[in-house]
Amino acid sequence: MGIHMDTEEIINLNNFSEEYDRNTNIDNDIEKVIKLYPAKVTSYLRELIIRYPSTVGRQFLPSPEELTSNGTDEPFESGKHCAGVHGLERVYRDRVIIIPVFDCPAYCRFCFRKSRVQRSKRPMDENDIKKAVEYISNNPEIRGVLITGGDPFLDLDRLDFLLTSLMSIDHIYDIRIGTRSLLYRPHIFTDELIERLNRFNVPDYVNPTKSKSLAINVHFNHPDELTPEAIRTCHKFVSKGIILRNQTVLLKGINDDPDTIITLFSILIRNRIIPYYLNHCMPVVGSDHFRTSVARGIEIMEELFKLSSTLCPNYVFATEVGKVHVINKEVLDYDYKGDQKFIRTRMVYNPDEFFRYTNQNSLPGRHYIDEHGCIIGYYRDGND
């Protein structure tokens, strides 16, 4: 198993100065940012950044704003030590996360794994994958696996070995691969690779309860990202019957208005991509300038509700104990600590299950179990 990546495709943003129209003091700040949070793009993405600096560029070019932050290094880390298996994470009853590769071809500045993925961290080896498969095999309540990263498509052999191993487990039938490579480098998705992936879609026409599905979770945040190459690649997937579901992150100044989101989701629907999640930008270090309020996201969703339901994804924010689906801003319960605003939420997750799945014996800070035995979680809100 080896990383299948053309290193000439990667651009070190320390030498990407032509993209910055800033003075010397700010350039010095950018050097500080890069030392804290590395920066990287692909050659394909570089051209998009030049073409769309205010939409695509802002998502990938380091900014002095990253030096001012109330964010945390670990915004959603509770399950990463699950069963002591490197690369295996579990927070929920019926699904796990597997991270075969801990790096990406390019670094989103708002990534919730920002503080740990963008470092040298070894990928899962064959023994790690076997341990993960053994853990899943011994827990029949798990029915789904999300393979994410980093980006799983950095190493195709490793991904193929993992998929083949998972397919041997009878109770696993929902496998998803999370990637942003359709934006970073759509050319890697050759007909041969897509055929290779489609082997893991296994319908059972006689007993459909035995069918197995492989889907791709793609990530587009703005209509400018839907290039001809990206759209062509998406159609190659769906023409083979591989489901594409899009996850969008709500980003201040990029897509935090109804018109942009409606345009984005309308293009996705036209091209057989399901708007799946609208994720509130998580409170990760160096991302404050991207974070709207949760209420702003609800306002955008209310505009979507006036239109076809095919345009309406799940709007969620993620606390340290799991996702919260948000529908109505009237139910938001605010709590203030100094100048920081938190949303207090009663979680749907069982505390005993949370402790068991995450291999922990206490809840994260600012979380507690109420008199009804429910987890009460706190989520730091953003500002509009």
Image (tube, grey):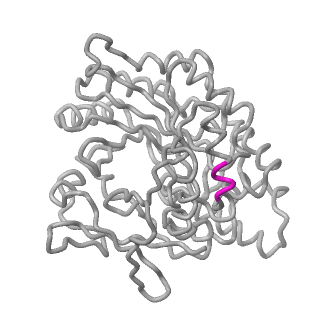
The magenta stretch is 258-262
- From the top left corner, tell me how far across and down residue 342 is, in percent: 42, 76
Would you identify the image quadrant in which residue 290 lies? bottom right
Q: Is residue 103 toward the left or the right of residue 203 in the image? A: right
Point 46% across, 69% down: residue: 329
Badge count:
0
Judged from this view, the residue extending furthest toward the top is: 206
Where, by quadrant of the figure, is residue 336 drawn?
bottom left
In the rendered view, would you say 334 is above or below 73?
below
Nearer to us in this view, 321 or 273: 273
Residue 295, placed above or below residue 151? below
Which quarter shows the C terminus? bottom right
Q: Position of residue 208 (x, y in %)?
A: 29, 18
In the image, residue 317 lies in the stretch drawn in magenta: no
Residue 288 horizontal side relative to residue 17, left or right: left
Question: What residue is at 30 percent from the left and 53 percent from the top?
Answer: 79
| Most distant residue in the bottom direction | 338
- Chief secondary structure of the magenta portion: helix
Q: Nearer the viewer, residue 125 or 206?
A: 206
Is residue 377 shown above or below 38?
below
Q: Nearer the viewer, residue 350 or 45?
A: 350
* Residue 244, horizontal then vertical, whole percent: 52, 32
161 lies above or below 138? above
- 381, 133: nearer the viewer: 381
Measured as percent of width and height from the top left, residue 146 is found at: 39, 39
Q: Residue at x 55, y 44 (%)?
A: 308
Residue 270: image quadrant is top right
